[in-house]
């Protein structure tokens, strides 16, 4: 008769292993202490916002915006309002805490007003969701109109990574605008990791924005995109160069990314760098490299162009 295998727990750590672990823990503690003293001189180390909590809050927000698609399975129409209300209350409470944690990282923050400020910012975010839902519906309509493979609006909502990236960007951009750039960047990078579409939360996107396929798209912090713009995979709207201060550090916040006007199409692999303007109605072909502005209704391809380039 076969002998049954005996399940055994992990072997206890040897004295040598225990000493090793204790030594490494002590050295890591020293590195953390030095790092924290450098970042937070003269004060207690603050608690950081939680990436997992921010991810959950973004998902709850999306479920409240599109409860039939991202709410609980089998959600009945008569239960929808109650679900949305509960989700929004949870987002408001959770976001207030995470915003408060980000604000506390600023050494100039006032403990007396921090809580009130966090509540006000979270409430402003909740109030913005009606506008964001209306705006994102134009993105969904643009995707349906622009992709002959799309069989329904529901398919776009469920399946298109570009739509997901754009909605998450609109949420992140609202956080960025309200003054919580760390939470905004966390939201943006979660979207980046799941869709392979990298949109900085500072970028301004107009209505009816469609990213088709999307893998490898990069849109920089100060990019401005107009109405009814369509991008394909591996498009880069990036910076050409960076201004440097007298001390050698990079100057932050200056406009350095392209402005894309209304009704522009940019095909796969195009790279547009610097604070240039792509005029309305223009078509930028696949693989094109641009560092100068083009006037409205231009057609630019690798082989030829039908416009006059301007600085």
Image (cartoon, rainbow, N blue to C red):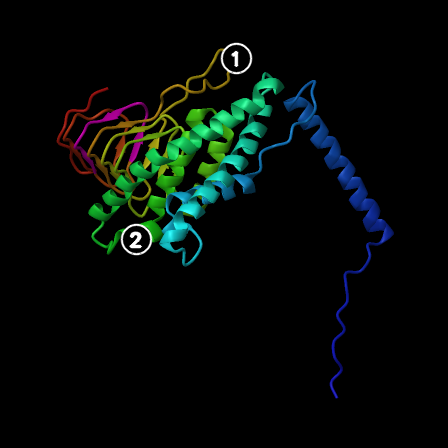
Secondary structure found at label 2: helix
Apparent side of residue 58 relative to residue 114 in the rendered image (left or right): left
Residue behind mark 2: 154
Image location of residue 150, percent across then percent down: 25, 53
The image position of residue 22, as x and y in percent, is: 80, 42
Q: Residue furthest right?
A: 15
Tag of residue 258:
none
For the residue carrying disc 1, how many other residues have a C-alpha within 10 Å: few (<14), some (14-19), or many (20+)? few
Locate residue 258, reporting x and y percent. 30, 27
Mark 1 lies on residue: 247
Q: Between disc 2 and disc 1, whose residue precedes?
A: 2
Residue at 23% of width from left, 32% of height from top?
227
Asked which quadrant contains residue 233, the reply is top left
The residue drawn where x is 43% and y is 28% is: 124
Which quarter of the rendered picture does the N terminus lie within? bottom right
What's drawn in magenta, residue-wise? 271-284
Relative side of 31 to 19, left or right: left
Q: Residues within 10 Å of mark 2 (few under 14, many from 20)?
A: some
Is residue 277 inside the magenta stretch?
A: yes
Residue at image point 52% right, 22% down? 117
């Amino acid at each position: 008769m076969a002998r049954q295998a005996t399940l055994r727990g992990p072997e206890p750590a040897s004295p040598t292993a225990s000493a090793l672990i204790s030594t490494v823990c002590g050295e890591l503690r020293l590195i953390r202490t030095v790092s924290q003293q450098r970042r937070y001189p003269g004060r207690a180390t603050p608690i950081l916002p939680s990436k997992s909590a921010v991810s959950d809050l973004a998902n709850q927000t999306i479920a409240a915006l599109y409860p039939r698609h991202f709410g609980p399975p089998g959600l009945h129409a008569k239960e929808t309002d109650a679900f949305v209300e509960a989700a929004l209350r949870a987002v408001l409470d959770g976001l207030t805490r995470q915003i408060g944690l980000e604000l506390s990282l600023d050494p100039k923050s006032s403990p007396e007003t921090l809580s009130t400020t966090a509540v006000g910012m979270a409430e402003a975010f909740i109030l913005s969701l009606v506008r964001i839902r209306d705006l994102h519906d134009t993105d969904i309509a643009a995707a349906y109109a622009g992709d002959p493979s799309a069989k329904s609006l529901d398919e776009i909502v469920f399946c298109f990574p570009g739509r997901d990236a754009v909605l998450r960007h609109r949420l992140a951009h609202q956080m960025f605008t309200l003054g919580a750039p760390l939470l905004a960047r966390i939201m943006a990078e979660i979207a980046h990791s799941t869709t392979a579409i990298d949109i900085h939360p500072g970028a301004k996107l107009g209505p009816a924005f469609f990213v088709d396929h999307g893998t490898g798209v990069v849109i920089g912090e100060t990019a401005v995109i107009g109405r009814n713009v369509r991008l394909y995979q591996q498009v880069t709207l990036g910076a050409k160069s960076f201004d440097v201060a007298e001390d050698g550090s990079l100057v932050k916040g200056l406009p350095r990314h392209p402005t894309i006007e209304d009704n522009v199409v940019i095909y796969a692999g195009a790279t547009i760098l610097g604070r240039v303007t792509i005029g309305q109605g223009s078509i930028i072909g696949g693989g094109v490299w641009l560092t100068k502005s083009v006037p409205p209704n231009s057609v630019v391809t690798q082989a030829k162009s039908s416009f006059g380039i301007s600085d």
